[in-house]
Structure formats: C-alpha cells, structure tokens
Image (cartoon, rainbow, N blue to C red):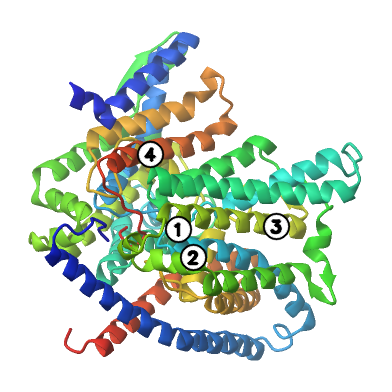
Amino acid sequence: MSNHPPSNPEKMKKNMEEKTANNKKSLSSRLSMSSNTLRLLIIAIVIFVGFSIVLPGKFLSIRNLQSMAVQFPEFGILTFAIMITMLTGGIDLSIVGTANLSAIVAALILTRLGGDGGAGVSMLITVPLALVAALVVGSLCGLFNGFLVSKVGITPILATLGTGAIYTGLSFVITGGPAITTTQLAFIGSGSILGVPIPIIVFVLLAIAFVVMLKRMSFGFNVYMLGTNPTAALFSGINSNSILIRTYWLAGLVAGIAGIIFLGRANSAKPDFGSSFILLTVLIAILGGVSYTGGFGTVAGVVLAVLSIQFLSTGLNMLMLELFGNSAAIFFRQFAWGALLLLVMVLNYYTEKRRNRAIAPGG
Amino acid sequence: MKRLLSRNETLVAITIIGLILLIGLNNPSFFSLGNIFTLLRTSVVMGILAMGVLIVIVSGGIDVSFTAIAVFGLYVAVKLMKAYMPDAPIWVGFVIASIVGLGLGLINAFFIAQFRLPTLIVTLGTLSMFQGFLLFAIGNEIIRDVPPSMKDFARSAIVRIPLERGTANLHPAIIITIAAIIITWLLLNYTMLGRGIYALGGSREAAERAGFNVTRIQYFIYGFVGLLSGIAGMTFGSLARQANPQDIVGTELNVIAAVVLGGAQLTGGYGTVLGTVLGVILVVIANSSLILIGVPTVWQRVVIGLIILVGTGIPAVRARRAGKRTFGLADV
C-alpha cells in the first residue's frame, strides 16, 4: 500500500481504475458477507450440537450453559476493541494491558476508599468513581495509542507492542506484583437483571452500539473507507488522523469496559491477567471475517465467532480433562488456538482465491 | 559529520556511554571485570536472538514466535540427549536444537511465503502452537538433571582472571554470539541474499521485479531465525544448567526493543548489525543496571516499552518530515 499522491494524469487514471476495481471487490465481498455470517452460524451450531452429542449430559447441562454464559463476554468485548482497529488496517496489541491497568486503577480506588481496609467511604460513591476511573484510564491509553499511530506515525504493531509493555509495566509498578482483591464489583461479575447475567447485557449493548456506529454513522463509514483504501480516503477529504485517533481511543475505552468485567468476575485485578487473550481476540476476529488488511468485518460475524470459540473452548476442555487431566487440557487449548488461527487463514486464502477467479476469469 | 550524528547508531552509542558514566559514577563496581563479564554472559542469548529478529525486521516482517522456538529446541535437545546419549558432547545438543529450530522456522516460512499471510498473525499463531505442543505432547516438567556435558559447559571459561574474591570468568558462549553476529553481517552486506532481504523490506513488488525470488528469500529468513533461535535456546539452557519449558517465552519484547532501538525499521528495509549490537548492549545494561541508578526493577517493563516507542518514534517522525507514511498491517 503505497500512498504517494499521483503526480501525472496517467497515474491518476490508473489510480481511478484501481479504485473501481476496489469498489467491485467491496461489492462482491459485501454480498458474500451475509454468506460468511451464515457459514459462521452453521459452524457455531455444529460445534454446539457436536459437543452435546460427544459429551452427553455434560456439555448440555444448565450448569455448563450458565458458566459459558458468563465466560465469553470478557474476551468478546476485547474482540470488539481489536476489531475496530483491524478495520482501519491496523491492530491494537495493548488491549489486554489497557484492560488490566483500568481494572487495577478501579480496584485501587475501591480498596483505598471503601471496603473493610479502606477509608470507609460508601459504595455508592466508590463504585461509580471506580467505574469512571476505569473508563478514563482506558480512554487515555487508547488516545495515547492513537496519537502514536496517527500523529507520530509509528506502525500500529510496534506502537501498541510498546504501549502494551508500558501499560502492563505500570500495573506492576502500581501493585508491586500481586493482585488487588475487592468484592465491591462482584455484582457486575455475578449479578443478573431479569435472569440475564450483567456481563452478557454489557456485551449485547456494546454489540448494538458497534452495529449502529459502523453501519449508521459517518464515523463507521470512514473507518471502513480508511481500511479499504487509505489513498481514496485521503482524496475524499477524510481527516484520517482524526479517524485513527478516535478508533484507538474507542479501542481503549472498550478495553477499559473489559477491565471492569475482569474485576467483577475475578474479584481481583492482576497485572498479567489474560495473557492469552491477544491471540484469542485475533483468532475470533479473523474467524469472524474481519480482514487483517482492513475494511472488512461485521459485528454479526464477530459475535458468532465469539460463541463458536466459547463452545469450542469449553467442549475441548471437558474432552481433554476426561482424557488427559487438567494441565494437559490447558496446554492442548493453547496449541489448538494457534493451529486454528493458521487453519482459518489458510482457508480464507483459498476462498479469496476462488472468489477472485470467479470475478475475473483468466485474471 | 552531520550524517554521522543523525544515525540511530550514533545516538544509541552516545546513550550507552552516558548511561555507563552515570551508573559507573554512582557505583564504581560497575566497571569491574567481573561485572563486565557478567553483563556479557547476560547478553549472549539476546545477542543471538537479536540477529534473527534483525533479519526479519529488515525484510519488513515481524516474528514473535522465536522464543517458543528457542525453548522448544532446548527442551527437545536435552530430552533426546538424556534418553539416548547422556554422555554425548555439548555440540550434539546444539546440533539437535538447531535442527529443531530450523524445522519450526520453516513451518513459519511455509505459512508466510506460501499463502502470503501477515507475519505478525502467523507467528502469533505459531507461538501459541509451538509452546502448546511442547507442553502438551513433549513435556511440561523442568529438567534439572541435565547431561554432564552441559554442566561442564556451564562452568567452562575462555578467560579466567583471579580477583580478590573468586575469579572473573568469560564464558565461551560469547564465541557463539560473535559468530552469529559475523555471519549475519556478512550475509546482509556481502551476499545477494542479503541484498534481497533489504529489497524485500523496501518493497515486495520492487524486489520481485528486480528478479528476487521472494518466496525463497522468505523461506531462508524464517528458517534462519528458527536455526538461530534453536542455538540461542540451547545456549540459554547450558548457562542455566536446566531445561524449563516455560522459560524464554515472554522475553521477545526485550529482543524486539533492542533491534528497533538499533535503528532497524519495519518499513523501508533499513537496519544494521552494528546498530542491533548496540541496541542489545543498551537493553542489557538498562535491564540489569537500572537498580544501580535508583530505578526499581519493577519499572523494567515500562522502560522496555519506552525503548520501543523511542526506537520507532524517532525514525517515524523523520520519515514523516520527509513526506512518507505507512500504517498498514497488511504490509507487515
């Protein structure tokens, strides 16, 4: 992707042709997007039914369904964060660091001000304060990423690798290593409204917000445009710096929300929590049809991919536990996620190849 | 003179000298031969790994799986030696580890070159895959009772200088690092393959049009990184006198930080062996001596992060002034 402005009419013409080619591709991709969603739906159902048959009475039990229901929102929410950065053609590798730093600042406020060992301030004050603080920390982390990617111009991979280390490092500096424990947010992690666990409600609300933002707002349109063709975006007068900053800010904010869920579920904030989540979120995003070159990907695809991975994770875990024992189950999943990511990308490569052949025979 | 000053290498060298003076004035024992030999021993493994990472970054890619390859090579080598040839000399272990490393590196290369997949995401996947496979299928227990040749190697020295208390030993593993540095330097500067790696980093399309076989170059790059990682892993285990399957993984950021600080750029096919060596020295000094200038070790990670941002930020700002910019994941 070279972004030099065309200097002569011939190049300009070539550029225009490229643009129409891109439009054609985007149209066909958009048409097949719904088939991609359908495919994911089938995958999710097959995995679910498959494990229900292989693990009779275990997978399809009320207890297991409940435990799965509270597990997926935390990495599902993180996937929304990485998804939006991938739509612009970048990536945010610092989301887990951001989420943990947000959780730790929130936990610090809760334990210092309220609770048994704290200053005895009412939960009515400490909880809202902690929630706001987590969101502010997430936002600041995201804004800093956005600044580095857009204004300074560092490649997103290296910028967010660096800031990820800084955010995780700051968490270690704040806690000195051990976790901060507080049960004041337990109502978020284990509570429910009308029988629906709160983490799921947060996940669904975020999904709706992302759909509205990406499909109905000009910001969403610009994000897709920037990811599809930065040159075209530049010439259509989009302020790409502003879009990038807002994108990474949003990723940070969403990671902050994930941090609140971490804290509510685990009742403790640890600097190195969820170290496998980066791989998992990239896997979900790619499985869900988000393109690593930017421009393509839908919320529906990501939601279905989150569910598939949750079913697969729980099912594999139960199966391995039965066959080999606990630690082996963890190691096997680690292997499986990596292998699955590669498999999905190779399959995508062949689908893409076939599609291109279908569009332009002989080309 | 102006060009010399504007080079990353010069900046890093000046920073190193400044840091050394700062630490040395606060704590004169820093300049002791014992401490210098210890620092060299610490930088041995990172130095080997950094050469591999340098080549990948120069080619416009990124590899985050090399630590998993290193520990995989080490663990398999030690396990095989213990099982079949407990009395074999140390070089057997190095040969096994490098073959294993080469094999795993070629798996990376297969996905990257054959399917044109982005290097970050492929190696993120293989990192998890290699480590998961090692722990699941090969072993997850620390091997403390390593073969005798490894124990002997850990204790050996090429220079022994008696001090008031004990001796200052220079470990022979430094020779491996120096060899890796020289080979990488020759490769990048005096071979057509090296030119191809730079060309690929500059622009894939241009490299192809210039007649370079990009697929073959990528197989070489990731195979070479795997080979070096296997050797680095075996070196690490020999120095530590144990094979812990959970070691090394998680230190990839330190190596990447050293390489980008040394001026290697993910875009534009730029990076030198000298810069990388300086970057490694700076990161090792910063990591092991921060406490001497009053920075608590808990800040280490923050410092590594800042080093990455400084190392990438300076060239990015310069490139921006020169009117270029890139921000795609697909390009990597």
Residue A237's spot in the image, x, y percent? 37, 60
Q: Nearer the viewer, mark 2 or mark 1?
A: 1
Is tag 3's residue or tag 1's residue first in the polypeptide sequence? 1
How far is the residue under mark 2 from the one under mark 1? 9 Å
Above or below — where is A335 with respect to B326? below
Instruction: Give the Cα distance between marks 3 and 1.
Output: 22 Å
**Labels 4 and 3 within one chain:** no
For label 4, the residue is B313
User: Which of the 4 image quarters holds residue A309?
Assistant: bottom right
| Element class at badge 2 | helix
Check residue A262 in the rendering and tell me which mark sits there, or answer none. 3
Q: Earlier in the sequence, mark 2 or mark 3?
A: 3
Mark in the foreground, 2 or 4: 4
Instruction: Give how far apart the Cα atoms at labels 2 and 4 are.
Output: 25 Å
Above or below residue B290? Residue B154 is: below
Q: Position of residue A127 (x, y in %)?
A: 82, 50
Label 4 amino acid?
Gly
Which residue is under mark 2?
A: A282
